[in-house]
Image (cartoon, rainbow, N blue to C red):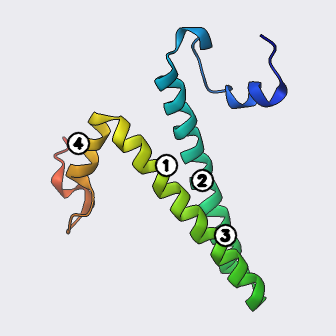
């Protein structure tokens, strides 16, 4: 099996031998890597949108940002559906009123 530069970049954060990881683990890696990339992209697009002074470009950047939001949400949902423990944590933590950390008890 030959490895291209693109393949090497895609697997840069995989620490185990590829042939020792099952397909679902590799798919999860792909999704989590893409999720991280989309989060960075959302941050950059939001900054560009906020700094932009041209009204027409601002609309284009807003559309790109909003598309990235949808993609990020789809990736997160894909991951949630395939990780039962994350699903449980998300159901406990998301869409609740009040302080975010209030539902958790931390030793200080």
Residue carrying label 3: 64
Residue that protrudes farthest toward the bottom in the picture = 55
Earlier along the polypeptide chain: callout 4 or callout 1? Answer: 1
Earlier along the polypeptide chain: callout 3 or callout 1? Answer: 3
Earlier along the polypeptide chain: callout 4 or callout 2? Answer: 2
Residue 52 shows which numbered tag?
Answer: none
Give the foreground label among 1 and 2.
Answer: 1
In the displayed structure, 92 sits above or below 70; it is above
How many other residues sit within 10 Å of disc 4, few (<14), some (14-19) or many (≥20)? few
Mark 2, secondary structure of its residue = helix
Mark 1, secondary structure of its residue = helix
Q: Where is residue 84 in the image (x, y as percent from the top left)?
A: 28, 35
Mark 3 and mark 4 in contact? Answer it, CB < 8 Å: no
Quadrant, the C terminus: top left
Q: Which residue is drawn at 72% across and 78% down?
A: 60
How many other residues sit within 10 Å of disc 3, few (<14), some (14-19) or many (≥20)? some
Q: Which residue is drawn at 79% across and 31% down?
A: 6
Q: Position of residue 48 (x, y in %)?
A: 71, 72
Whole-number angstrom distance, CA of label 4 to CA of label 2: 23 Å
Mark 4, secondary structure of its residue = helix
Quadrant, the N terminus: top right
Mark 1 and mark 2 in contact? Answer it, CB < 8 Å: yes
Residue carrying label 2: 38
Whole-number angstrom distance, CA of label 4 to CA of label 1: 17 Å
How many other residues sit within 10 Å of disc 2, few (<14), some (14-19) or many (≥20)? many
Residue carrying label 1: 75
Residue 88 shows which numbered tag?
Answer: 4
Earlier along the polypeptide chain: callout 3 or callout 2? Answer: 2
Relative side of 34 to 5, left or right: left
Earlier along the polypeptide chain: callout 1 or callout 2? Answer: 2
Q: Where is residue 18 in the image (x, y as percent from the top left)?
A: 61, 14
């Amino acid at each position: 099996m030959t490895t291209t530069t693109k393949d090497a970049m895609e697997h840069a954060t995989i620490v185990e031998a590829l042939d020792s990881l099952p397909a679902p683990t590799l798919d999860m890696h792909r999704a989590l890597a893409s999720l991280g990339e989309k989060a960075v992209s959302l941050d950059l697009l939001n900054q560009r949108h906020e700094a932009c002074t041209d009204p027409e470009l601002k609309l284009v950047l807003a559309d790109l940002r909003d598309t990235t939001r949808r993609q990020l949400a789809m990736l997160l949902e894909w991951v949630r559906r395939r990780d039962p423990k994350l699903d449980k944590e998300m159901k406990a933590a998301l869409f609740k009123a009040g302080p975010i950390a209030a539902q958790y008890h931390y030793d200080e």
